[in-house]
Image (spheres, grey):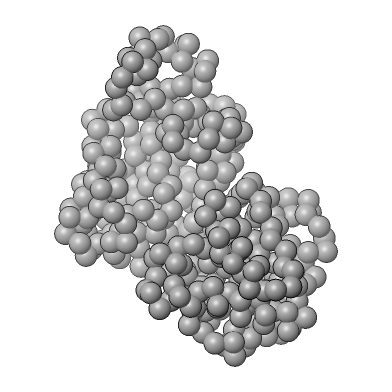
């Protein structure tokens, strides 16, 4: 999502600079993307006191920026507000947006999944957020309705697809042979801690069935880690159970990950942005997920039937893999049409967002 934001604001030739919190990735990550680091305004001590007396020009020369120098805030959490998440996260963010609004900043929540908001404490915290933000974009119709149930100004609540749809990659930079038979199976550790006990217990055996089924169809399965920090445990267990060798692709760069996915014959995945990366490049994809955002994503790409459950047996898995092979060309055309439509929606979104967040930069 950061890459999508960076690519968009690159068109402003340096007139827009992006700053992130100090706990956003490593220093090397922030340096790689040319990000400024925001100084935490709430954490005092000798280091913070020293920062407060240094001139702004000196701090800027080291890539540091005070909160008072920030003109607008854009949040791209992905999925952080709803009953499945700790209420403290929403309360902290509510306090942040209330402080930012007093400082005169524009605040936009970029497209993400939201809700549900059945827990009273979380509902109250999210209402505080909605009262302060200038725009809030739901990534799907279910999230849109969850936000509307909390209550907000209808003019600030909008709908737009995931911004990573627009990330530009060079598919030709990857091996041209990948697309002939490679199937990428993308695990997600959230399937173990965000699902029921039954589904969590069924997940790794389910992935094993997917690997075996693709092999029987003459395809070459490979594991692709879209989050190398968390998902390697699942990959290691699948490699152990497979007995025979299976390749594991570990690539930390998100742009390269998307280009790798764009050269697959088929993707079977549980990481949301791996699915977006494949679908947005018209790669036939089977999804298995832990929240409403997976079903709505497949609906948006006009392939709602290409959804699996960890409890599905080998026959169901094989059936959908055969559909993906048999109807490959038709699926590609449908995905291209849906992708073009959603990219047009993204362009409209960015025009609206820029009209708000850049207002203080004029």
For image coordinates 41% across by 9% down, the residue present is 55
115 with respect to 305 (left or right): left
Residue 281 visible, this orientation = no
Image quarter of residue 165:
bottom right
The x, y position of residue 343, in whole percent, is: 56, 57
Residue 203, given in percent of the width and then of the height, sits at: 50, 74
* Left or right for 31, reference 355: right
Q: Can residue 1 be seen here?
A: yes
Foreground pick, 199 / 325: 199
Q: Nearer the viewer, residue 144 or 67?
A: 67
Measuring 38% from the left and 36% from the top, which residue is drawn there?
A: 73
The image quadrant that residue 74 belongs to is top left
Q: Is residue 30 above or below residue 219?
A: above
Q: How many marks?
A: 0
Horizontal and vertical percent for residue 307? Answer: 52, 77
Above or below, 6 relative to 13: below
User: Residue placed at 29% from the left, 43% from the top?
Assistant: 93
């Amino acid at each position: 999502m950061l890459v999508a934001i960076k690519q968009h604001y690159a068109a402003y030739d340096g007139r827009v600079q992006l700053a992130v919190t100090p706990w956003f990735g490593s220093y090397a990550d922030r340096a790689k993307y040319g990000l400024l680091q925001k100084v935490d305004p709430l954490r005092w001590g000798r280091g913070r006191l020293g920062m407060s007396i240094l001139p702004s020009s000196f701090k800027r020369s080291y890539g540091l920026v005070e909160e008072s120098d920030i003109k607008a805030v854009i949040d791209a959490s992905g999925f952080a507000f709803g009953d499945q998440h700790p209420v403290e996260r929403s309360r902290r963010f509510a306090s942040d947006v209330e402080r930012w609004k007093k400082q005169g900043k524009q605040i936009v929540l970029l497209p993400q999944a939201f809700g549900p908001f059945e827990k009273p404490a979380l509902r109250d915290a999210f209402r505080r957020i909605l009262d302060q933000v200038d725009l809030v974009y739901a990534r799907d119709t279910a999230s849109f309705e969850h936000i509307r149930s909390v209550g907000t100004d209808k003019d600030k609540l909008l709908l737009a697809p995931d911004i990573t749809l627009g990330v530009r990659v060079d598919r030709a930079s990857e091996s041209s042979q990948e697309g002939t038979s490679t199937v990428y199976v993308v695990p997600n550790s959230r399937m173990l801690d965000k699902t029921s006990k039954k589904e969590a217990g069924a997940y790794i055996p389910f992935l094993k069935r997917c690997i075996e089924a693709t092999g029987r169809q003459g395809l070459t399965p490979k594991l692709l880690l879209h989050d190398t920090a968390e998902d390697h445990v699942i990959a290691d267990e699948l490699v152990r159970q497979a007995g025979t060798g299976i390749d594991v692709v570990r690539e930390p760069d998100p742009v390269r990950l998307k280009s790798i996915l764009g050269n697959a014959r088929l993707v079977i995945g549980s990481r949301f942005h791996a699915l977006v990366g494949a679908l947005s490049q018209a790669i036939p994809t089977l999804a298995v997920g832990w929240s409403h955002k997976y079903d709505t994503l497949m609906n948006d790409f006009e392939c709602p039937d290409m959804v699996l459950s960890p409890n599905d047996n080998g026959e169901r898995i094989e059936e959908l893999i055969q559909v993906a092979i048999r109807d490959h060309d038709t699926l590609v055309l449908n995905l291209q049409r849906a992708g073009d439509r959603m990219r047009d929606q993204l362009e409209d979104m960015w025009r609206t967002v820029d009209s708000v967040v850049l207002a203080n930069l004029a």
